[in-house]
Amino acid sequence: MNPLTRIVTSIKLRLNRKKFECGDYLEAYATNTDLIATISPELAIGGLWDEMGKHQFEFLKAHGLNPDHKMLDIGCGSLRGGLYFIDYLEQGNYTGFDLSSEVIKAGQRKIEERGIAHKSPNLYVNTPRNLKFDFLESGKFDFLLAQSVFSHLKPEHIEECFDNLHKVMAKDARFFFTHHPGERFRARSKTDFEYPTSFFEKAAQARGFQIVNLSSEYIHPRGQNMLLLQVAGS
């Protein structure tokens, strides 16, 4: 990217910050990610490209992910982990979506570059800007992942996700997700939030799910916790 484009993008990012305060949060977040992705698709989803991509892949494999499983990658970004999952899973078994159209485009390019387009992954831009999952066409999933997603969402977005999980979780499905830990809900910045584990436990219990804390098994380089949500009693 040439210097002028970087300057213009920087100005647009500063202007977009106002939308976080007076506009729709998810719309502002999508715009922000789109703009950063024009500079670097890797930076747009938090960097640590090789490290975190392989880390999440190996973790889910260790917890039973097999090639014949159907997987939903919530907030898949530019496929930092998705490239590993697509290559590993059987044809058509990977589905990912993101708010940002730019990171999805970047992910599609990376699929071609990696030579795994024949695996026919299903990629979607979340144009409704919600977590009701109605825009998906791939049925239900055995494994779900939200890597570094809830760390950027507000309580009402997470509640909406939990309200609609029955639409996308197969029987005995497992939903793995990370979050910034904290003693209470707190905004670190306009786009980063901390949650106590109890928030997720209460939200899950109210909807017939249970939470298992796997943080000691998932050493995140930036200190995020890893939780597993599944149907209560499973």
Image (cartoon, rainbow, N blue to C red):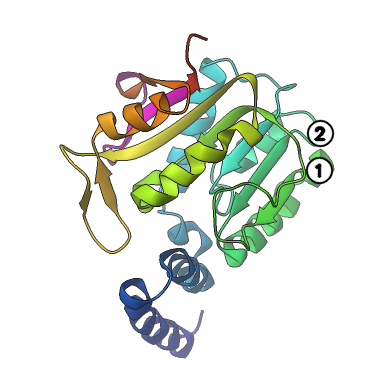
Q: Which residues are magenta?
A: 216-229
**Earlier-in-chain disc, 1 versus 2:** 2
| Label drawn at residue 91 | 2
143 left or right of 194 in image: right
**Residue most extreme to the left:** 183
Q: Using the rendered image of the protein, determine whether residue 149 is visible from the camera's viewpoint.
A: no
Residue 140: percent from left, percent from top: 70, 31
Q: From mark 1 to mark 2, how far is it between C-alphas? A: 6 Å
Dividing the picture into quadrants, the one containing residue 177 is top left
Does the CB distance between marks 1 and 2 fall below 8 Å?
Answer: yes
Q: Using the rendered image of the protein, determine whether residue 199 is visible from the camera's viewpoint.
A: yes
Residue 15: percent from left, percent from top: 36, 84
Residue 231: percent from left, percent from top: 52, 18
Q: Residue at x 33, y 81 (%)?
A: 14
| Label drawn at residue 143 | none
Residue 27: percent from left, percent from top: 49, 69
Q: Residue at x 68, y 49 (%)?
A: 134
Queried whether the magenta region covers residue 153, the answer comes back as: no
Query: Which residue is labeled 1 in the image?
Result: 120
Above or below, comparing residue 172 to residue 116 in the picture: above
Q: Give the residue type at disc 1.
A: Ser
